[in-house]
Amino acid sequence: MKPGRLSHLEQLEAESIHILREVVAEFDRPVMLYSIGKDSSVLVRLAQKAFAPAPLPFPLLHIDTTWKFRAMIEFRDRFARENGLDLRVHTNRRALAEGASPFAWGSNKYTQVMKTHALLEALREGGYDAAFGGARRDEERSRAKERVLSFRDSYGQWDPKNQRPELWNLYNGKIRKGESIRAFPMSNWTELDVWQYIWQEDIPIVPLYFAAPRRVVEREGTLLMVDDERFPLLPGEEPRTEVVRFRTLGCYPLTGAVRSNATTLPDILREMVEATTSERQGRLIDHDEAASMEAKKREGYF
Amino acid sequence: MAAATEMTNGLAGWLRAQEQKDLLRFVTIGSVDDGKSTLIGRLLHDAHGLYEDQLHAVRRASVRGSTRGEGSTSEIDFSLFTDGLQAEREQGITIDVAYRYFTTARRKFIIADTPGHVQYTRNMATGASTADAALILVDARLGVLPQTRRHAQIAALLGISHVVACVNKMDLVDFDRAVFDSIVRDLRAIGEKLGLRSLHAIPVSALAGDNVVSKSERTPWWAGTTLLEHLETLPVENGARAGAFRLPVQLVLRPGIGYRGFAGQIVSGSVKPGDEVVVLPSGKSSRVTSVDVAGKPVDVAFAPMSIALRLADEIDISRGDVLVHADAPLAVASDVEADLVWMSERPLDRAKSYLLKHTTRTVRAEVASIVYGTDAETLEPVAKSTLVLNDIARVQVRCRAPIFFDAYAAQRATGAFILIDSVTNDTVAAGMITKALEGAERGTSRTLVGDEERRARLGQSGAVLRVLASSLAGAFELGYALERALFDGGRIATVVDEARDARDAAEACARGGLLAIVAGVDADGANGEAVELNGQTLRASSREELVQRVLAAVR
């Protein structure tokens, strides 16, 4: 850092820290949604910086669908342990008992039950009035419309047609009992900013982001990784080993891999700069129907 | 997407180049159907800010439902990139701000694409509040519309340094230079009236791409730059904000014994260990022992860094306080004058207190009076008795606790506030402080009747008697007993029942036999001066005559 001038990333960092501190100052029970991905890793680092030398003044919450990549869960537990994080894990046990699975239920119903409903249940049980998320406005076009402090009614619903005006960096944190706020400190970051920050700050991320030989099947143009024995193979399908990596991580049956030889962060950055498709291209749940993300968020999805 | 050629110097060179790039935040504003979203789509597309899958999705959607009616596979409806809500695509209008990001070899950009509909002006202000520059779109066929004026006014009020007028749809007026020149003349006249600091105009066609990223051959008479080139070369602040040091305290970091850090984002100026700082409002001073970023001490910190300060003395500092250098204090006042943009469907209620959030401080506040409103059409001042959605007015605000501020024109972050309805919790207005109000401006000491004269006539000296008891009922009981006793003792007293504002207090005084005079502004100012008395409006051809009529009426 040169005196007198902040780089683009330093400006973004300062803005994110400001948002994190405002929410902690104005709410009684904040929580941070932790999804194990690269954005979550960056968000945790930003929060550590915001409150250093104090520990994070809120717990982390992971909505575990039980269909995450195994490498994600291993990373989650190690990351929480090594960083001394207060990690809470919540699963919609009832739906799981009823057999909820992305294969059996379809991605739409499954996401609604195992992600949206589970999230709302966990927020209610924890009595949380503000939940941080690592979502960025460049990810998807309905995200691009969302406020930094996004108001949700007592059912966790978003009303995109009636959002509070949000001026300057004066965030309105006033809510009634039962209502809540989703706070997005990384709203103005882009995917490239995130990767650059991970590289500069040496932030640990799940190894699935790096290219390696993995067992995959190609289904309707998407490369799906066969992460465990629950993956139902269709007649004639035979998993093969390919060198792939992931640009985004979610439930393994719903997340497409990309063919890549990027095994280091500089490789990934180079690939990013030359990329011609967006990261969410590999996200099946975004493409369920037109305005799919918006529909999910109206119901309470993050 | 970001020009792959940039990587040819290797990763290290690329990262260095990224560090050097500055950031420009701009907002696109204008009327409905002037092509704002289309312009953004065009800019992103031609500057290679779009991914193939996004293009593909929009190409598909362009066939299904285009804002331009029958979509064809060959033409892309660029507005579909930014109109991200279902309701927006159904209706072909923009409802809320969309934020977009793109980068060129020279600069990074954050675009706030805002709605043109009058109904959603508040969302336009939302997008404009964080912008360094504004692109105002004007349809070449229609010229300057009322909404263009309103948006220009908000841009001026918000203090946006650079305004770039894009005269769009030039292809539909045959790239006629006279049309362009005439619109630019109109815009300049508006700019002068509003005091816009810089206004630059470019003839474009967002749909066809003329003068957006590449120079058009169809405007040979145009010697200026393309829009993108202009945006790449506008001067920006580079993040470091000049001015005196100001740190509004967000919260106090106390991880354990031995550490007490006052955390906040520096609004302006810089700070280093050893500096003397003063805490507002207490006025206590201390010396900075450490400036911490992410828990580690640094030699110096400056705006807009988020830091924590440690001080030599144990003084009481909490959220809402501001730390400044001793030689550059902030103005302190409870009564301020401000420009207000009303953003709620519910009109302003002057009898009601709102929450005013300014820096990290939230206080209760009332809009004590409306100095004048602004006519959206003529931009001239008009009398107003209340404010409704999208109204813009100069007002006097009375805070129940002092705030510490700079004028908005001098420093955005310490001059801006929002008003929150404390019942609905909605953000109802955006405010920009112009100055502190002195006693006379508050209307408290302009009286032509001396206190001595008044006391002589009544035969008593005035006093405020604050009655205290363990319950409200008890307090009133004692209050009325006192009133009776004072009256019986030859004094004139009246109980003022929890007055919420000047009007309530005046009514209480009047019931007690005093003639209470309340000053106000007539919404229909054209009728001249008047006095309302017992439900009757008194008027006269001169002020003297009006005074005589009032004297006769109160007898």
Image (spheres, coloured by chain):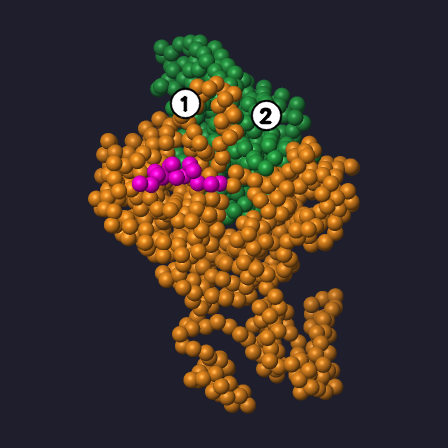
Query: In the image, which lettered chain appears green?
Result: A
* Span shown in magenta: B223-236
- The CA distance from mark 2 to mark 1 is 24 Å
Residue B165 appearing in the image = yes
- The quarter of the picture where residue B511 lies is bottom right
Which residue lies under the disc numbered 1?
B4
Give A175 or B544, whichever is nearer the viewer.
Answer: B544
Residue at point 45%, 21% (across, down): B7
Amino acid type at image mark 2: Glu
Whether residue B453 is in magenta: the answer is no
Residue B28: quarter of image: top left
Q: Is residue A167 above or below residue A296?
A: below
Q: Residues within 10 Å of mark 1 (few under 14, many from 20)?
A: few
Query: Which corner quadrant holds the C terminus of chain B?
Result: bottom right
Kind of residue at badge 1: Ala
Where disc 2 sits, the SS reads: helix
B354 left or right, relative to B284: left
Q: Chain of mark 1?
A: B
Numbered badge on residue A201:
2
Q: Is B462 placed left or right of A247 in the picture?
A: right
Q: Position of residue B428 (x, y in %)?
A: 50, 55
Residue A282, above or below B550: above
* Residue B453 shown left or right of residue B174 in the figure: right
